[in-house]
Image (cartoon, rainbow, N blue to C red):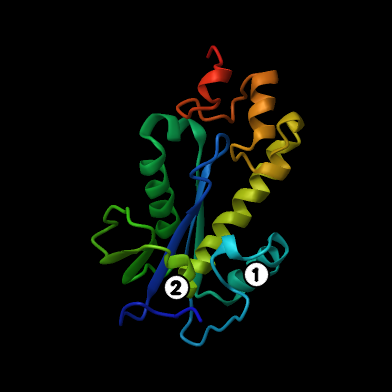
Amino acid sequence: MLLLNHSNYKLECGTDEAGRGCLAGPVTAAAVILPDDFKNLILNDSKQVSEKKRFILKPIIETEALCFGVAHVFQEEIDTINILNASILAMHKSIESLKPQPEFIIVDGNKFKPYNNIPFETIIKGDGKYLSIAAASVLAKTYRDLYMNKIHQEFPMYNWKQNKGYPTKEHREAIKKYGITKYHRKSFRLLPEQLKLDL
């Protein structure tokens, strides 16, 4: 059973990101503040929930949350500031759009930078422990998946609709065959050494 709150603050937000390990597309983060009486039996870490259930949960979270924010940080910025900084920036941007602003932030994982002097705590596997982080993980994943489905139509040969930009064998084979697109992260190792690309 996931817990509602980690702190004693009334306005506690959970934040998480999706797409850190992808070769293409943005890293996407969400932040969610849930009401005290929020309950949902299927909400869990987005990796533990089927795609179908994530898209059932998305409007429930959006309707029942006190507030939520979602932000993309795109591949050009990832290449400039690195993926860790881009992930934290996406979380900051998603928190920035919350109205009201949180009094306490719980973050999935172990890396974060202070945001507006609001106290925070990083929680390893937090998306499997707290409802607000789980809700943020579902929103980050569904919003990013919808974006990847959209750019899939522009470059269907990479099959982003299916692999969402992750380094699957099929995605790497397509990079080898067709080269890279404007959506690929040039700072990432897009191909294993034996399949080197001349960039």
Residue 144 shows in this picture: yes
* Residue ID at (58%, 19%): 195
Q: What amino acid does circle 2 point to? A: Lys
Label 1 secondary element: helix
- Of the pair 112 and 63, the residue shown nearer to us: 112
Residue 143, image x, y percentages: 61, 53
Kindly report the distance in space between the C-alpha atoms of the residues bearing marks 2 and 1: 17 Å
- Could you tell which of marks 2 and 1 lies nearer the N-terminus? 1
Q: Is residue 5 above or below residue 110?
A: below
* Residue ID at (37%, 62%): 124
Q: Is residue 170 above or below residue 16?
A: above
Residue named by callout 2: 129
| Residue at the front extreme, as displayed | 194
21 sits left or right of 162 in the view: left
40 sits left or right of 123 in the view: right
Q: What amino acid does circle 1 point to? A: Leu
Report the disc number at residue 57.
1
101 sits left or right of 167 in the view: left
Local packing at callout 1 (Cα closer than 10 Å; few below 14, some 14-19, many 20+) is many
Label 2 secondary element: loop
* Residue ID at (68%, 63%): 50
